[in-house]
Amino acid sequence: MKILNSATKLALMLALIGLSACGPKAETEEELVERARGIHERVITLDTHDDINVANFTEESNYTMDLPTQVNIPKMVAGGLDVTWLVVYVGQGELTDEGFAKATADAMAKFDAIHWLTDVKAPEQIELALTSDDVRRIVASGKRVAMIAIENAYQVGMDMGNIKRFQELGGRYMSLSHNGHSQFSDSNTGERTDSLGNPTEPWLYNGLSEMGKEAVAEMNKWGIMIDLSHPSKMSNMQAMELSRAPVIASHSAARAMNDVSRNLDDEQLLRLKENGGVVQTVAFRSYVNSAKDQAYSSASDSLRNAIAAEMGVTLLGRREVFQLPAEEREAYMASMAPLTEAFEARKGEITAEPVNVADFVNHIDYMVNLIGIDHVGISSDFDGGGGVEGWNDASETFNVTLELVRRGYTEEEIGKMWSGNLLRVLDDVQRIAAEIQAEEAE
């Protein structure tokens, strides 16, 4: 046995102390990004709210192409987004037989468009999922996944049988109202007031209508998740009280972080936790940080107006553009291409900061701390106004995972937020629906 002298022993001890003090080697930026990419590839990424236009579901223009939409199959592939919930949305109209009939017809056109994409145009690229097992099977096959959301129960009309009909067509969640009171519930827009503080859209029901209460039971029975993202707070609290199944907020942020009526306050979030539901945090600039968004929008508008003046171009407001006949609107948008190109080249002149992925994840952090990792998810509201710097279309989806990794979330936690929590709620809702149907059959 070799005997070490005192000097050698001292040198070894000092070396060991030094190694202990250094600890594990710090992760480099390159290593962190690589680790995040691995997580992003392994988890199922699911975005619960992507709006559609039926004009993009034709042979000439469809989601197999990289259209100038925020979501389509090429962008999903590029960004590693596995699942898109395509939204059957109808805006709020008059509560009349004519209004209901038009809304139902508009809804059916969107259902048909989604089925055309998945069943006829591109079944080898994207498949419709009806259950969480479908999602996992389709993702494992290498294809993208489509699911169907229903935004605004106005389109149900006065025929409660449409709830079951929409479920049979693939609808798996529905909100009872949108921007404006429906026949089922008050909307968050009832909070709006004029300059004198008077409500611009007084409450119709102080929550759910009697028909809305019936709709909660029908949605429970047929396995449709109840969506809290647009109804009023009172409507949401009543829906959670009545529902036998967990609920979701398909695209909402935290009101404590940004005080707008579309975000959920702490009382609603805590009640949602008790209910077993999940809030899908939305990356909609003005819901994430209104002040920052307004400052950046103002600076952007100033630059765009200056460029337009230099080019001798007359700019129209968004509403004016929307109100143009289709052909005139397309011609106007085409004429704006040079201005848009010039604006993109000079965006560096804008000193205000845009709302970004870090601001978005701040809302995730807040809600995880308040109600726990099992009740928080992710959504974009793409093609419906959503998007932040760094996640402005589906091709940039990895940046969300990267920011979550930077914040210290584990792969298991990231998997829960991207899809695990939402699919767990879907499973619970469908299980409870089967129980209700069995009870009624006895």
Image (cartoon, grey):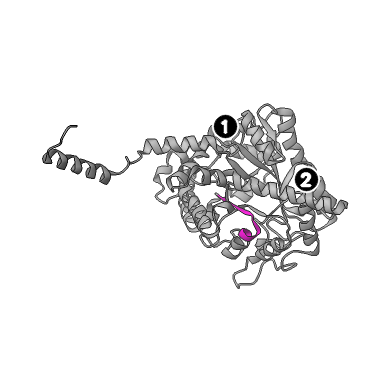
Compared with 302, 111 (above or below) is above
Type of amino acid at the residue the image marks with label 1: Val
Name the image quarter holding the N terminus. top left
Q: Residue at x 50, y 43 (%)?
A: 400
293 left or right of 156? left
Residue 173 in the image, given as x and y percentages of width and height: 71, 49
Q: Residue at x 42, y 37 (%)?
A: 33
**Res 335 quadrant in image:** top right
CA gap, disc 2 to disc 1?
Answer: 28 Å
Q: Which residue is mark 1?
A: 77
Which residues are drawn in magenta?
A: 272-282
Compared with 200, 219 (above or below) is above
**Badge 2 local density, few (<14 within 10 Å), some, or many (20+)?**
many
Which numbered tag is attached to residue 167? Answer: 2
Which numbered tag is attached to residue 24? Answer: none
Q: Is residue 94 in view? A: no
Name the residue nearer the viewer: 426 or 432: 432
Residue 141 in the image, given as x and y percentages of width and height: 64, 29
